[in-house]
Image (tube, rainbow, N blue to C red):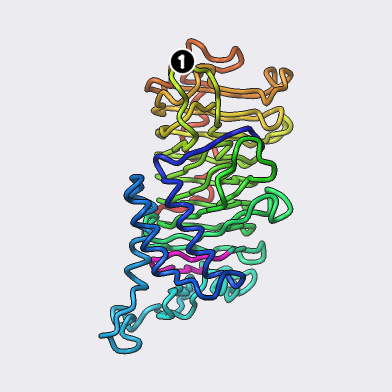
Amino acid sequence: MKMMSSTSLKSISLTLLIAILAILASKHPRSHPNMNPLTSIKYLFDVGLATFSSPIISSIIDRHHQKKRPDHKRKKGSICDDFPRDFPPPDTNTTSILCVDGNGCCNFTTVQAAVDAVFNSSQKRTIIWINSGIYYEKVMVPKTKPNITFQGQGYTSTAIVWNDTANSSHGTFYCGSVQVFSDNFIAKNISFMNVAPIPSPGDIGAQAVAIRIGGDQAAFWGCGFFGAQDTLHDDRGRHYFKECFIQGSIDFIFGNARSLYEGCWLVSMANPVAPGTKSINGAVTAHGRASKEENTGFAFVNCTIGGTGRVWLGRAWRPFSRVVFALTTMSDIIAPEGWNDFNDPARDQTAFYGEYNCTGAGANMSMRVPYALRLNDTQAASFLNVSFIDGDQWLQPYV
């Protein structure tokens, strides 16, 4: 999604994001062969930490650095001594477990290699257990591999990271660090990041997706999504997000899925806006419903919106865009008008933008655009639980 912006990271530090990019890019085959990533990451980590406060990013870097720190007193291979000898356990009739560890303590050192090892059209659930660390790779889960789970060790300690943009990958739809096209995908306790350079005002093709979700019946539990412009491409299908951390600046949740977000933290990292100015420099959502026949939309329930900048709750990327915020706490970063028609007044008549019993300084609806809806109990009811995504038919409880 394109919008003029100039972003700086406060909640999640720009310096530390660039540090991740710089260090991890040093591991790329095209990078300078003499660069020492461990020395550099420690230096940039220390510099970034002195400049900004970023507990999420810094904890990932710190764990990664500690894990990779050479210890000449150890015997070769002793880094794996703490790994259970019987892990992963053998397959059952319903489950297979594959293990990923960047140090070579598992069957696989990359997430993509583990995905590639999953049998096509398997009816078993394959749990890809991913150890703490940063996995700098572009990952694709094809449509032929349903029933996969990415099991991280915490969204502040396990991350899949890449740095493509719309320019580098021939379009926004292809730039995701992780792309999921299979059905019944689950992710738990892991982060997805795009650490491409933060776009300057007016940049063309700078969209940088952390994950694209194009399969049906996907669930995300305790996950992190980090980027700036177009962080989370909630593309197609029915999806569930529970207690996730989603950070970005412009249209950072976009797509045409039918998704329920429960208890999530939505954090804008757009530039702070000077007092007394009315400029807008971000948007939380950009939903892409193109016709009233499409049963799609985003519902946010019991969420929290905060961060920096002055942002809209949503922009009408397509004429019948549908987004509801219910029982959500909104900080004063939300622009008083709340919503935007994507500079097409005709969309005022077709977009469905609703708010229900929200709180906080940004929830004041007295200056909302005329087409914003203050939902009553009856109107809001169908958006408030998993029935919105037919979750009673497919969503499994967290185990």
Indicate yes or no whether the magenta region holds residue 136.
yes
Where residue 130 sits: x, y (%)? 43, 68
Residue 389, placed above or below residue 152:
above
Q: Is residue 66 left or right of residue 179?
A: left
Q: Amino acid at mark 1?
A: Gly
The stretch in magenta equals 126-137
The kind of secondary structure element at disc 1 is: loop
Residue 237 among magenta residues: no
Q: Using the rendered view, name the quadrant where residue 156 is placed.
A: bottom left
The residue beneath circle 1 is 276
Report whether 343 appears left or right of 117.
right
Camera-side residue of 22 and 393: 22
Q: Which quadrant would the N terminus be assigned to in this image?
A: top right
Question: Which residue is pictured at 58% across the width and 24% down the height?
Answer: 353
Which residue is drawn at the image coordinates 40% and 51% (left, top)? 222
398 left or right of 217? left
